[in-house]
Amino acid sequence: MPIGVFDSGLGGLTILRALRMALPQQDFVYLGDQANAPYGHKDAAHIRELTVQGIKCLFRADCSLVILACNTASAVALHDIQTEWLDPSQRRVLGVFVPIIEHLTSRDWGDNSPPTHTGLRDVALFATPATVASGAFSRELRFRARDVHVEAQACEGLVAAIEAGNMQDAIELVKRHVDALLKRLPAPQCAVLGCTHYPLVAEAFQKALPPETRLTSQPDLVAASLKSYLIRHREFAGGSGKFRYLTTGHPATVSSSAKVFAADPTDFETADYADATTPR
Ligand code: DGL
């Protein structure tokens, strides 16, 4: 049975690449909602509606487990989707925030004991405006780690530059956003790239940050987390390493832009958005 991987655009391919390396026998279906990207400036209700449509499309493509590779969807919509829409006895949807929080705090998500001293002090978060506005990352981190301070920087324009393949502009934007954050937090202990697109300019982030700042790699953490989840939930695993790429955008254009994100050829097909007008 394939596992669905959802993103607003092509950035989720950075997550998919790590998933495929960790789980070479697993089948995957990737869906990019290019017709509606970027999500980073949309309001919460709209992001939730688009995310539900994407999940439904992946359910129709035979996926019973969907990974929201999109941080914006994970931060803004996942909690509501899990509590108000999804029937977890049938299908599951997982996000990309939990593995980072578990890694940074060295504790399981289900551990609801009071926050402890984890050694974490100053954390920099780079993400889309909607992810930063949701406050989800700092809220979840502070729930577990005492005395932690999160300084978040909304990286205006960065997703659009990367999605368009303008890497020189993207590198300039990274420098500008890192400088802006360092004015408020001069020596972050660690920096989280909280957007699927940003690993493609990770080197530029590392160069612009102080050398002692540790960069957190989301794709590897998400892959390790899914691998351990599938050991506990074998019912969602299976296949022979097959994969498909779906898009709500123009397949030929998206396939050509995808070359920036993936070494292998990625031939996108039109996604089945049969009931896209129905939000539930
Ligand atoms: N892929 C989304 C994320 O990880 C960002 C792109 C967008 O703004 O749509 O947050």
Image (spheres, rainbow, N blue to C red):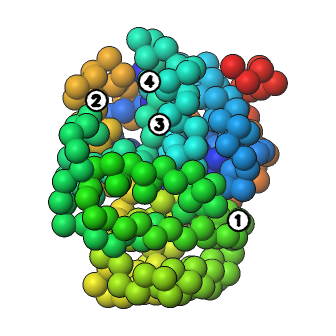
C-alpha span from label 3 to label 1: 22 Å
Among numbered discs 3 and 1, the one appearing first in the sequence? 3
Whether residue 249 sits left or right of residue 92 in the image: it is right
Q: Which mark is residue 160?
A: 1
Q: Which mark is residue 134?
A: none
C-alpha span from label 1 to label 2: 34 Å
Confirm or deny contact between disc 3 and disc 1 (CB under 8 A).
Answer: no
Q: Which mark is residue 67?
A: 3
Q: Examine the rendering and report whether any part of residue 220 can be seen.
A: yes
Please tell me which residue is depicted at 28% across the width and 70% down the height of the picture: 121
In the rendered image, the residue lying farthest to the right is 277
Among numbered discs 3 and 2, the one appearing first in the sequence? 3
Whether residue 39 sits left or right of residue 265 in the image: it is right
Name the spot of residue 208 as percent of width and height, x first.
Answer: 46, 87
Q: Disc 2 designates what residue?
A: 230
Q: Quadrant of residue 247?
A: top right
Among numbered discs 1 and 2, the one appearing first in the sequence? 1
Please tell me which residue is depicted at 39% across the width and 57% down the height of the picture: 218
